[in-house]
Amino acid sequence: MATRKLDAGLHPEFHYEQRLSPVRARIRSWLLPIIRREKEILVFIQSSLRHPFLDWYFPITSNLGTHTFYMVCLPLLFWFGYAPLGRGLTLVVASGVFWTGFVKDMLCLPRPLSPPINRMTMSGTHHLEYGFPSTHTANAISITLYLLAFVTQINDIDPNTRKFCIVALIVYCSSVVLGRIYCGMHSITGGTIMGAFLWWFQWNWQSDIDAFILSDSWFVPMAILSATVLLIYIFPEPVDNCPCFEDCVAFAGVIMGLLPGCWRYARSKYSLPGIDRANVPYDYQIIGLPKSLGRLVIGVAILFIWRMVMKKILYMTLPPFYRALNLNIYRKDYLPAKDYKNLSPYSIRAFPSVLNLLQAPIHSTGPQSTADLYEQLDAEKENERGLIARRRVNGSFAHDNHNLDQHDNKNNSEKVNLGNNNIKNGNVRESSIIDNNDSDEENKNDENFEDNKHKNEKKNIVSFDAIEEPPLRYDVDVVVKLVVYAGIGWLAVDLIPVFFELSGLGVNIVARNQIVERYADLDRRTLRPLIPQDREVSQDYPDREVSQDYPVHFFNSILREVNFVDYT
């Protein structure tokens, strides 16, 4: 196995400071010591709580923060009459994923050092990301606070039901947040602070956000599409090959489809008139259990089929299109279409999050990414400096730190480039260290210093082939994720609710009027912070009757409804 000697030029002070802008490097240097100080707390928590059941439980609960979990759970709120709540939660989750990923790639801060931390995961790539702030923690905190605020403000809810909801939310939040610490994946503070802030912002500004989304102006979808593309464009380039960007693109795509979908559905004849025109008509007493289960099964199936089919189609059609127009997204870790003919099977797996549930948690100790490797080497460097300082105090040798610095900084520029080339080409799992038997004979006064120096050299001869690279990524991946997840957002809030009405899974005109009256009263009494209270219903879209024979001309109705047309 080919090996390269890693010198000081490859330590974080060179690897990151030379590649980050001055502002990014300064913020990183300020936060890095804080993250490192939390390591001892994390080691104590992990060692104190370690148990075989928790080794299984916490990695399993980490799946509560995956794409698949959100893709299944969030649309249910729209399909079962809680569109304001679903819209708010989706914005909170998407904002959490995007902005935590943004900060991760901007600051390039590592995960807690392993060893002494032992990591556990069920994901194929999350361990390759930067560690600060935690996306799982941010979303768990924001979702829990949002739902707690919602549950505690409802007046007409059984006290036992309210207590059950509160306990369930606490268990959910504790499982995810404590689980990320127990699994050795994140620090303590970053995700918690960001999650609390996102909840505060969304909860307090929800009325204004909804007023904008549900207004009648065509500026709304255009502004949402433009803002989403702009955010993707300004997303920072990480120093190392980090897969955060694709998760952020996916959730940006959800917003790109969901908000214009809400805007369009509110303008259709199938939405509920009143304060929130984007809500889907639903009442369990009227629809019943069979139709409710039909909504659940058929709706989720449509989303999974869309995801699977569109990924296949786009991965077949986009590469030739990119080659013909010589398109390039200009991100350094993405392979341009002109450089490949066949795509890796990893890129077109339909349900990776579902497949993760079938495997046992992966336990690992040692660096798993380039960021981990640099953090480990920097920690070894700090330990060595501390040892030298203690020996100087004890009078063990006469040399000062100038000798060590002179040795460490030799050929920095050459070895930075050499190390990065090796890292880019590496593709294995664990690190290995190879002994170096060379030694220099020095005088007796320098013996302790030389022994320490050679021990350091032995540790720093590291095989870069031992560091796992993220799966190969292609230039078309960005557009594929954007289109697929934008379609999921649009389907969930617009086309699937229309499908329910046309296929007989909706409500009739009498039941609709009952729901309108009940929902309007519910809005005034319980959903006040969630929906705009002072906005009048648009006169351009008064209450309209729904044809009772809509299942008859099913396909023709679908084709008419997907157009931006006012049916009066």
Image (cartoon, rainbow, N blue to C red):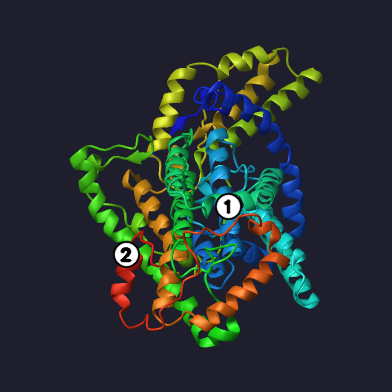
Residue type, mark 1 in image: Ala
Instruction: Identify the residue at horizontal 38%, vertical 34% (top origin).
Output: 332
| Residue 158, percent from left and from top | 77, 77
Tell me if mark 1 has few (under 14), some (14-19) or many (20+) residues whose alpha carbon lies within 10 angstroms of its own: some
Q: Position of residue 272 (x, y in %)?
A: 53, 69
| Up/down of 416 relative to 508, above or below | above
Amino acid type, residue under disc 2 in the picture: Val
Helix, strand or loop under label 1: helix
Q: Residue furthest left?
A: 324
- Label number found at residue 211: 1
| Residue located 75% across and 43% down the image | 40
Q: Quadrant of residue 55?
A: bottom right
Sooner in the amino-acid sequence: mark 1 or mark 2 = 1
Question: Percent from the top left, x then y, of residue 336?
Answer: 28, 40
Comparing marks 1 and 2, which lies closer to the viewer?
1
Residue 399 is at least partly visible in this image: yes
Q: Residue at x 48, y 62 (%)?
A: 266
Q: Which residue is mark 2?
A: 309
